Amino acid sequence: MKSKKISTDKATIDEILSRGVSEVIDKKNLEEKLLSGGELRVKLGIDPTSPNIHLGRAVVLLKLRDFQELGHKIIFLIGDFTGTIGDTSDKDSERPMLSAEAVKKNMKEYVAQASKIIDIKKTEIVYNSKWLKKLNFAEIGFQADAFSLSDFIDRDNIKRRLDTGTRVSLREVLYPLMQGYDSVAVRADVELGGTDQKFNLLAGRTLQKTYKQKPQNILTMNIIPGSDGRKMSSSWGNTINLIDSANDMFGKIMSIPDDLIVSYFIHCTRLPMHEVKTVGEHLSSGKNPKELKMKLGKEIVKMYHGEKKANEAEQYFISTFQKKEIPDEIAEFPIAGKNIVEATVASGLASSNSEVRRLISEKGIKINGEIISSADVTIKSGDIIQKGKRFFAKAK
């Protein structure tokens, strides 16, 4: 059998360990492993707490692809068990448990969506219910003995909740054991995650030592804000999803704050870093940010829909938003997820539901420049509602 070729190009490795990366543990050790040419097992776990993979999660998937392109074995772990339990790493309140049915429904298209980024045929796909369902109290007790209670309650978000008297369930405390044991089960050499996952990733190192395995190296990625400037999260409706149409994806990217342009180029594209640096220099010199944002939109849409669709999305945006003189600054309202009738009233564009229905029947309401003929429309984050020629509201 022909041996697998692993790239040891130092410049490429240096970029993988720095682009969009917050921290590497243990960096020196991981560099040595990558330069040695041996195959590593690189793990990324995602809990299917929503049906869509968005750009925030794609940041880490892109890093997983970087390792795959070096020739390493990547492991895409779908948390069908941990998804029911709920990770509180980035939450200031208790995350509710999900039913197994809800998780199963959410993860239905996860592999297909991930395949937009990674080569699924060369990926090891695993589901953590395979081993977590089998654990008994004796083994969970053995794992828990590797940690002290203070290890858990000293975490920033847990400490804040305890200080304010907010409930912290024992289930939340046990979650890092499950994610840590995932690394034991798949024998991970490297695990990737967002900065909010650091405690869980370190739990993997601890449990691997407990099970007499070599501790995995850790690579944490910066977390990118969503279209409203907060962390990109399905629960906040500020996501740019991989399954969004080319036009929707482009339009949402055009709605991000200008100060996120460079960050999105770094984290959400693989535009060469010297070109990203040029984008930053252009912004600093006063170049129109809209031009750079359109370049960003094309770059991202091209990754998920191809160059032809990216060009079409750009033209659609120009003809729909620019030539029809939609203003650059539009008041934003928390109306994403509402139907068009509720959203129009909540934004102040109309005074009653009956007025909205009348305007729709008279073709007086548009969404993103298109006349709507039915009240059965749900507003998404980034959508622009237009009443007549001069009144606008943007959903967030």
Image: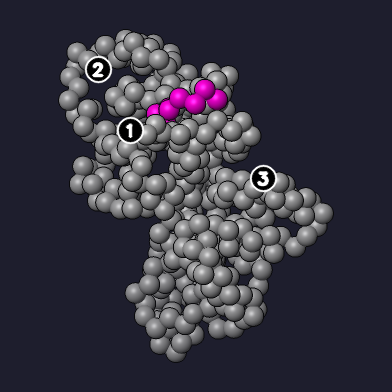
Percent x, y of residue 145: 32, 10
**First in residue order: circle 1 vs circle 2:** 1
Q: Residue at x 17, y 19 (%)?
A: 136
- Disc sitting over residue 140 in the figure: 2
Percent x, y of residue 186: 31, 27
- Apparent side of residue 323 relative to residue 87 in the rendered image (left or right): right
Q: Residue at x 62, y 81 (%)?
A: 324
What span is colored magenta in the figure? Answer: 35-43
- Residue 273 position (above or below residue 152): below
Looking at numbered disc 1 in the image, what kind of residue is underneath it? Met
Task: Give the mark toward the camera: 1 or 2.
Answer: 1
Find numbered disc 3 in the image and state the secondary structure of the residue it sits on: helix
Mark 1–mark 2 distance (CA, rounded to whole Å): 41 Å
Label 1 Cα neighbours within 10 Å, binned few <14 / some 14-19 / many ≥20 = few
Q: Residue at x 39, y 47 (%)?
A: 119
Looking at numbered disc 2 in the image, what kind of residue is underneath it? Ile
Percent x, y of residue 276: 68, 49
Q: Nearer the viewer, residue 380 or 253?
A: 253
Q: Residue at x 47, y 58 (%)?
A: 304
- Residue 119 position (above or below residue 389): above
Residue of label 3 = 273
Task: Give the mark toward the camera: 2 or 3.
Answer: 3
Q: Nearer the viewer, residue 59 or 123?
A: 123
Residue of label 1 = 1
Mark 2–mark 3 distance (CA, rounded to whole Å): 45 Å
